[in-house]
Image: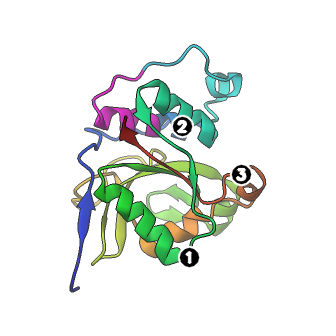
């Protein structure tokens, strides 16, 4: 493991809550705001599907972060090679920018993965760090309950680079709703 690089943002949340219902977008936003020491406030103008079901799209999340005073542009990595995708996320982490991603969620629990679920279920996670020697990202996945089984510097889960790329492919329908390899790097304005 020569030339191992570890990068962790300084804007990490103090705790990692378990989502309720379809609220992974909101819980990721809450975690990001906690890392920036910004109190979460539910905006009056939230879309009906978000208020009733908790179902957020990437633009809802970007807007919610911006309403709270953060820079949160929606970006796409679909045209990048896999190594460039990994490097893009690492570069944002090196700039102390947590990275929210729209992924396919095959993680039915901490130790149970379903490839079929990954192509059917959309989900959001936030990347807070990486380790190139171990080829892992440190992420907050609000769907997973409890702490990671080993000590990690940030987040509540790790994803290998391979798992990360696989999940970032998203469910099949992301290609039709403009969420293919989408991500939101977050920084203070």
Rendering coords of residue 90 (x, y %): 37, 64
Sequence-wise first label, 1 or 2: 2
**Is 67 situated left or right of 37 in this image?**
right
Rendering coords of residue 6 (x, y %): 24, 67
> Can you tell which quarter of the image residue 7 is in?
bottom left
**Numbered circle sitting on residue 178:** 3
**Is 123 situated left or right of 16 in this image?**
right
Rounded to the nearest angstrom, the CA distance separating label 1 from label 2 is: 25 Å
- Check disc 2 and report its element: helix, strand or loop: helix
**Numbered circle sitting on residue 62:** 2
**Numbered circle sitting on residue 57:** none
Contact between marks 1 and 3 (CB within 8 A): the answer is no
- Check disc 3 and report its element: helix, strand or loop: loop
Is 49 located above or below residue 122 in the figure? above
Rendering coords of residue 159 (x, y %): 41, 66
Q: How crowded is mark 1: few (under 14 residues within 10 Å), some or many (20 or more)?
A: few
Sequence-wise first label, 1 or 3: 1
Q: Is residue 185 visible?
A: yes
Q: Give the range drawn in magenta.
A: 28-40
**Residue denoted by label 1:** 81
Q: Is residue 33 magenta?
A: yes
């Amino acid at each position: 493991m020569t030339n191992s690089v570890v990068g962790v943002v300084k804007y990490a949340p103090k705790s990692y809550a378990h989502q309720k219902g379809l609220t992974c977008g909101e819980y990721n936003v809450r975690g990001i705001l906690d890392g920036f020491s910004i109190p979460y406030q539910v905006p009056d103008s939230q879309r009906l599907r978000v208020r009733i079901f908790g179902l957020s799209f990437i633009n809802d999340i970007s807007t919610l972060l911006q309403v709270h005073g953060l820079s949160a542009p929606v970006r796409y990595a679909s045209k990048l090679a896999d190594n460039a995708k990994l490097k893009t996320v690492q570069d944002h982490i090196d700039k102390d920018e947590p990275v929210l991603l729209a992924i396919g969620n095959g993680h039915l629990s901490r130790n149970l993965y379903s490839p079929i679920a990954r192509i059917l279920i959309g989900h959001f996670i936030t990347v807070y760090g990486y380790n190139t020697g171990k080829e892992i990202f440190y992420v907050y996945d609000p769907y997973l309950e409890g702490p990671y089984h080993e000590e990690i510097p940030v987040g509540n889960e790790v994803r290998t680079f391979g798992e990360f790329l696989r999940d970032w492919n998203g469910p099949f329908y992301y290609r039709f709703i403009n969420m293919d390899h989408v991500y939101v790097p977050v920084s203070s304005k």
